[in-house]
Image: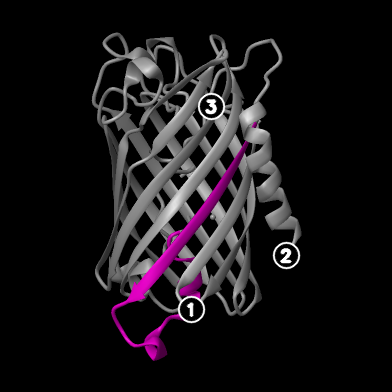
Amino acid sequence: MRRALIGIRSPGVSRPLGVLGVLGVLGVLLAARPAAAAQQCHPLAGSVWRNPGLSVGLRFDAAGYRNSRYEGDWQGMAPTLGFNHPKFAIMALLPMYRLTRNGRVGYGLGDLALAMRVPVPGFSRGALSGGFGLAATVPTGKASEDLGMGHVMLMPEFWFAHERERVQWVGTLGFARALASGSGSHHSAGPKPIVNPMNLSEIDASISSFVRLHERVSLKLGMYGAMPVGSANVVGVTRIIASSGVTVNVRGLELSAELQAPLVGAPFLARGVLQLGYRFELVGRKSRHPASHHAGHH
């Protein structure tokens, strides 16, 4: 769930034909504006609790990949539902995938992702805010088809956000642990599944910046890294991912597009993420926090 980013490199040529069209559209979206986990989890921004409301949306992912057993591409669509309160924020996401492995196409549900974050008053003063979070994946996807992990994954974290007039920084430091042993799971051959590969046990960190280019347009730049830890991993892989994207907000409607590129670990060849959402405010618009434009895009 947290940051669907990892893989195993192997020789050969990948042909992510089904992905190129989607990535091309995302590239046009990014270039058309002067210019977000992961990242399937954690989808919550550090400042979401400041702007109470209910959010609904759709997330689309597309990537090409190559590992020691398979090469191909996958596309995903996930409805999202989130609720923000001054004292907590929660979100749920259930992906559906089309996965091609060595020319064979399969369809199915992925793992249900759940996340919660709570601000800590002692860390939330002025421009700086922070708190703790907990995310989990529930094995609703078939592990045998590389659509799910086959077990529950728990991911506690610490997060922070620092906000200025035009720039917001959001960072996380977390730990992920599968409720399974290496020998008793399909992770014995390395990080799994293809659509959201993770180590059995790992630490991860991320940093993202949101730069407001216009009242309704923001640019996102980010880095994410994860490293296997402990004796649970039979085969562990470290990965580092760079990302850039753009977010457009218009009267509660939010559109974001993001491109991701692996620097270490090769979890995919390239990945595009497109998100469309609408936010129902539970308070008057006059009380909106200026940084709320970034809510839901970490």
Residue 193, image x, y percentages: 42, 23
Q: Is residue 244 above or below residue 290?
A: above
Residue 83 sits in quarter = bottom left
Distance from the alpha carbon under mark 3 to that under mark 2: 33 Å
Mark 2 or mark 1, which is nearer the start of the sequence?
2
Q: List the residue tagged with mark 2.
A: 33
Mark 3 or mark 1, which is nearer the start of the sequence?
3
Distance from the alpha carbon under mark 1 to that under mark 2: 19 Å
Q: Nearer the viewer, mark 1 or mark 3?
A: 1
Q: Does dot 1 land on a helix, a strand or a loop?
A: loop
Instruction: Give the number of the disc on residue 238.
Output: 3
Q: How many marks?
A: 3
Residue 45 painted magenta: no
| Residue stretch in magenta | 270-296
Residue 100, image x, y percentages: 53, 21
Q: List the residue tagged with mark 1.
A: 251
Q: Nearer the viewer, residue 199 or 27?
A: 27
Q: Quadrant of the N terminus?
A: top left
Category of crowding for the residue at label 3, using alpha-carbon neighbours closer than 10 angstroms: few (below 14), some (14–19), many (at least 20) = many
Q: Is residue 122 above or below residue 261?
A: below
Residue 193 can be seen in this image: yes
Q: Nearer the viewer, mark 3 or mark 2?
A: 2
Mark 2 or mark 3, which is nearer the start of the sequence?
2
Residue 213 sits in quarter = bottom right
Q: Nearer the viewer, residue 71 or 235?
A: 71
Q: Is residue 183 above or below residue 111?
A: above
Residue 257 sits in quarter = bottom right
Distance from the alpha carbon under mark 1 to that under mark 3: 40 Å
User: Which amino acid type is shown beneath numbered disc 1?
Assistant: Arg
What residue is rendered at 62% in x and 68% in y?
218
Q: Does dot 3 land on a helix, a strand or a loop?
A: loop
Instruction: Give the number of the disc on residue 136.
Output: none
